[in-house]
Amino acid sequence: MTKENSILIFDIGKTNKKAIVFDSEFQVIHEESTTFSELVDEDNFPCDDIHGITKWIKETVERLILDEKLNINSINFSGYGASFVHLDDEMKLIAPIYNYLKPFSDELKSNFFSAYSPMEKILVETAGPFLGSLNSGLLLYAIKETKPDLYKKIKYSLHLPQYFPFVFTGQVFSDITSIGCHTMLWDFTKNEYHQWVREEGIDKKLAPIEKNDTVVEVEIRNKKLQIGVGIHDSSAALIPYTETEQEPFALISTGTWCITLNPFNQHPLTKSELGSASLCYIQHNGKQVKAAQLFAGHIHEEGIKKISAHFKTESAFYKKIKLDENKLNSENELKKNLIKEKTSLNFKESAFLSTDMTIFLDENEAYHYLMAEIVQQQTFSSSQVISNTEIKKICVDGGFGKNELYMKLLAKEFPSYHVVAASVPQASSIGAAMVMGKIRKII
């Protein structure tokens, strides 16, 4: 009896890197994960270890494809966006993978919008706010302006999810989900690269756009494999839900970033939404989806470090904490300020992270206030794309879906919605498999 084929998905997050093997019924038959310490670029700013990650992926592929119990015949990748990998004429790496948190100078911003104005028009056309280096198109612009010698050597700039397929196929592709996630590259009103991209010649550095279901056949260790073209992780996470949910819904995909995606919000972006970090993504099928982003996973991680250091406790202390709303009833003004309703939002900032931990009785109380602030931020962020639409269900995917405080506090903030943890585990990995057509039935 011939053993069924399976598919290997690499899910490359900002913090965790996973390798997951699924069978044809979408059961996980193998899973492993790792993390990498950050390096620094030539400006001494932290950056991911792209060489180390690539080495791990190659070694993992060569090891797993030889495992006859797994019988892998296909590989695809989902990964975080807003980051380019740069190749020279010999198709070799020639630069670090610059961090999307790297400062984008006021001078560069002024020069850009002096040349391409008015600013508001471009932001509306590219369907997202100005985010500096988090707009990956502007990161390429910054390289052109501040590192001209490097820019001249770049043959192709590939978004991270498309770089890993290249490692195995030698072929370069761009993908619409990566292009369409707050890159400022794409004109959503014309469905093409924006005029500024062409005028700067940046489009010449970008590989041809390929369909998500494209596969390239390669041979590794005498085994034939089909390699996908990669997909942006938040867009991938949405796919299983659009295929299986029977009622209108919004998805909060949680990780380092918490992205609220509402495929049932067709309203054009407004000025106020642009000012609140709302934007549009492009789904794998080319359709737009309204989204809002929040740096909540990062805030949570930094908050845990701060609490653990002060109260001298293990970093996993929070996993045992159960919700006790009485802990959030303090009359202390500093504490009350942390959990007051948000009327505006800087999606990357947190009052908790600048709060003196001595105001809290213990790590349990401190964690309650950290999570209460995060949920207040999440409520404001998600409301930007959920309000005044037909949805009545909110699905939470990722780590926060398993966090009791997050889920119960969020449900309290959205009393007229059905707030549920993900019914589809490993959604971004499933989505990466689905676009290859390897899994036709999930539930």
Image: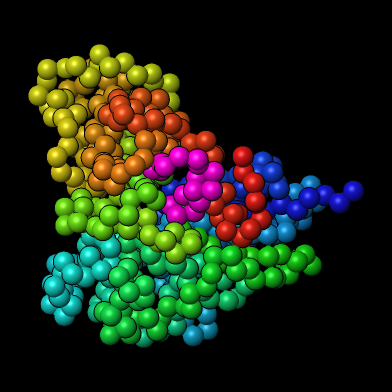
Please give the range of residues in magenta.
234-251
Q: 232 or 48: nearer the eye?
A: 232
Q: Position of residue 77 (x, y in %)?
A: 55, 58
Q: Is residue 248 within the magenta segment?
A: yes
Q: Is residue 327 visible?
A: yes
Q: Is residue 118 left or right of residue 245?
A: left
Q: Up-down: is 272 above or below 337?
A: below
Q: Is residue 391 left or right of residue 232?
A: left
Q: 299 or 55: nearer the eye?
A: 299
Identify the main secondary structure in magenta: helix
Q: Is residue 170 within the magenta segment?
A: no
Q: Is residue 12 left or right of residue 414?
A: right
Which residue extends farthest left? 333
| Residue at the image position 51 percent from the left and 56 percent from the top | 78
Q: Position of residue 326 (x, y in %)?
A: 25, 13
Q: Position of residue 313 (x, y in %)?
A: 36, 25
Q: Is residue 314 visible?
A: no
| Residue at the image position 43 percent from the left and 37 percent from the top | 395
Tell me which corner region of the image, top left, top right, bottom left or bottom right, holds residue 351.
top left
| Residue at the image position 32 percent from the left and 68 percent from the top | 188
Q: Up-down: is 76 above or below 264?
A: below
Q: Position of residue 232 (x, y in %)?
A: 46, 58
Q: Is residue 85 left or right of residue 128?
A: right
| Residue at the image position 15 percent from the left and 75 percent from the top | 117
The colour scheme of the drawn protein is rainbow
Which residue extends farthest right? 1
Q: 377 or 318: nearer the eye?
A: 377
